[in-house]
Image: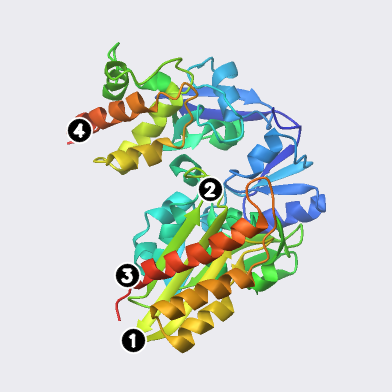
């Protein structure tokens, strides 16, 4: 039951910490690294609020032990803004009222980011299916779908 | 909630993992993708003394095509399978089934070996393994052996694997070129576990059905191979009446239980409806 060492990169910054092996990655990010943008919701992989990018792929931070992320590169919601400018996807959420209470928003953004990498030109049905990975209890899905639709061409242009 | 305390071991090799499992004598759990195990840890439904993490054993993740068989390392992620050109070409049924497994962020981590070893009867991969009559390779303290699906799945969440056995590989026969296929599923929301799912493959030779493969998920304590429904098609061909007879037989072959999600009767009804739907859609994509 000895503590383990975890070395990982979060949003391009190297971190090292020690924690019990049972510590979940989401709690390590929030409590040890003080990156509280990633939210903890259901703690069993259903709600998607804790979604982060692990080596570039969306994953549930509540279903990973911190020790499993040793050596990994993580992107959290805090890593989206650059030099004080919102990421185009964040800007689209702002423009299209893609959030109400904001609890699911970090998970929505990280999930949508991965979705748009896999499917750069998604149909509305693709977006709705992709975003079914995250629950919004304000049920503000309509604005969220519109935001992702609006961001898709911007991200395509940026990746060219 | 948070997991109870456990000892953590990152296995360095398959042998090392088996040795650790043997040492704990049934009190350790294998951590693969963690998409089913970690929720059970978080809820403390599972409180193992130790976790044996097999994520850092590189030779356990591969997709290899060999002599009409596609072999998957147990730790191959569902997401890798979803985007694999080999799978798209040789096992399009598996690719289609993969899109029903949870959501993309779940598939980033979930593995083929973990899904099969977990043996949830409503899960998609055990049904595909059963339909295509593949096999799994298991390593225990006394070496390797292969196990067919009929000898693997015993009941809900229970396989014939011993506590110190590690599922290391999944082998599926490549589908015949031009075979039709479909995975049909009904769930309340996309990404939920199936209430019932049907895996179907149909190979056509002219008007004749050269081979049919059918299995049901969510219609009993284990995935069900619907062999005598397949035989109707292989004997009577692929006309409307034969498809309907096969679907009706499928509903007779399953022994579903009632639970909070659906009654046994409703699951039986879904088995017939989804089998017919799967067969019709499979026929639409056959080339003979």
* First reached walking from the N terminus: tag 3 or tag 1: 1
The answer for how far apart the CA atoms under marks 2 and 1 are is 40 Å
Mark 1 belongs to chain: B
SS for tag 1? loop
Above or below, comparing residue B101 to residue B213 in the picture = above
SS for tag 3? helix
Q: Which residue is mark 2?
A: B110
In this view, the residue in front, B29 or B92, is B92
Quadrant location, the C terminus of chain B: bottom left
Are labels 3 and 4 assigned to the same chain?
no
Residue B207 disc label: 1
Mark 2 belongs to chain: B
- Contact (Cβ within 8 Å) of mark 1 with mark 4: no
Are labels 3 and 1 assigned to the same chain?
yes
Residue B230, position as x, y percentages in the image? 51, 79
In this view, the residue in front, A105 or B273, is B273
Q: Which residue is mark 3?
A: B284
Quadrant location, the N terminus of chain B: top right
Rendered image quadrant of residue A11:
top left
Total count of labels:
4
Are labels 1 and 4 assigned to the same chain?
no
The answer for how far apart the CA atoms under marks 3 and 4 are is 34 Å
The answer for how far apart the CA atoms under marks 2 and 3 are is 31 Å
Above or below, comparing residue A131 to residue B262 in the picture = above
The answer for how far apart the CA atoms under marks 3 and 1 are is 14 Å
Residue under the point 52% across and 49% down: B187
Look at discs 3 and 4 and give the one toward the viewer.
Answer: 3
């Amino acid at each position: 039951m000895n503590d383990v060492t975890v070395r990982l990169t979060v949003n391009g910054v190297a971190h090292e910490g020690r924690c019990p092996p049972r510590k979940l990655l989401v709690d390590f990010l929030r409590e040890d690294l003080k990156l509280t943008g990633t939210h903890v919701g259901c703690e069993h992989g259903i709600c998607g609020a804790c979604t982060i990018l692990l080596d570039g792929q969306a994953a549930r931070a509540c279903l990973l032990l911190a020790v499993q992320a040793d050596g990994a590169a993580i992107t959290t919601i805090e890593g989206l803004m650059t030099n004080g400018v919102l990421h185009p996807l964040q800007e689209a959420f702002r423009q299209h009222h893609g959030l109400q209470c904001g609890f699911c928003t970090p998970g929505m953004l990280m999930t949508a980011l991965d979705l748009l990498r896999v499917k750069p030109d998604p149909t509305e049905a693709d977006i709705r299916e992709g975003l079914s990975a995250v629950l919004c209890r304000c049920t503000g899905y309509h604005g969220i779908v519109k935001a992702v639709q609006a961001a898709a061409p911007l991200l395509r242009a940026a990746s060219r | 909630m948070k997991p109870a305390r456990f000892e953590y071991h990152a296995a360095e090799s398959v042998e090392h993992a088996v040795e650790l499992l043997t040492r704990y004598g049934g009190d350790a759990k294998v951590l693969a993708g963690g998409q089913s195990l970690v929720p059970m840890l978080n809820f403390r439904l599972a409180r193992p003394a130790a976790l044996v993490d097999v994520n850092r054993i590189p030779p356990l993740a591969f997709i290899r095509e060999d002599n009409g068989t596609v072999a998957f390392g147990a730790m191959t992620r569902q997401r890798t399978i979803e985007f694999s050109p080999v799978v798209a070409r040789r096992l399009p049924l598996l690719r289609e089934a993969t899109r029903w497994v949870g959501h993309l962020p779940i598939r980033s981590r979930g593995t083929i070996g973990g899904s099969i070893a977990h043996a949830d009867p409503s899960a998609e991969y055990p049904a595909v393994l059963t339909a295509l009559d593949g096999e799994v390779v298991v390593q225990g303290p006394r070496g390797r052996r292969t196990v067919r699906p009929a000898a693997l799945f015993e009941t809900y969440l229970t396989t014939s694997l011993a506590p110190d056995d590690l599922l290391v590989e999944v082998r599926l026969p490549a589908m015949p070129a031009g075979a039709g296929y479909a995975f049909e599923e009904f769930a309340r929301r996309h990404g939920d576990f199936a209430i019932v799912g049907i895996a179907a493959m149909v190979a056509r030779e002219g008007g004749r059905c050269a081979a049919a493969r059918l299995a049901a998920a969510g219609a009993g304590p284990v995935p069900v191979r619907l062999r005598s429904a397949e035989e109707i098609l292989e004997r009577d061909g692929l006309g409307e009446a034969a498809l309907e007879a096969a679907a009706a037989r499928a509903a007779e072959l399953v022994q579903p239980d009632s639970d909070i999600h659906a009654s046994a009767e409703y699951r039986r009804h879904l088995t017939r409806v989804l089998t017919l739907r799967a067969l019709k859609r499979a026929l639409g994509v056959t080339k003979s």
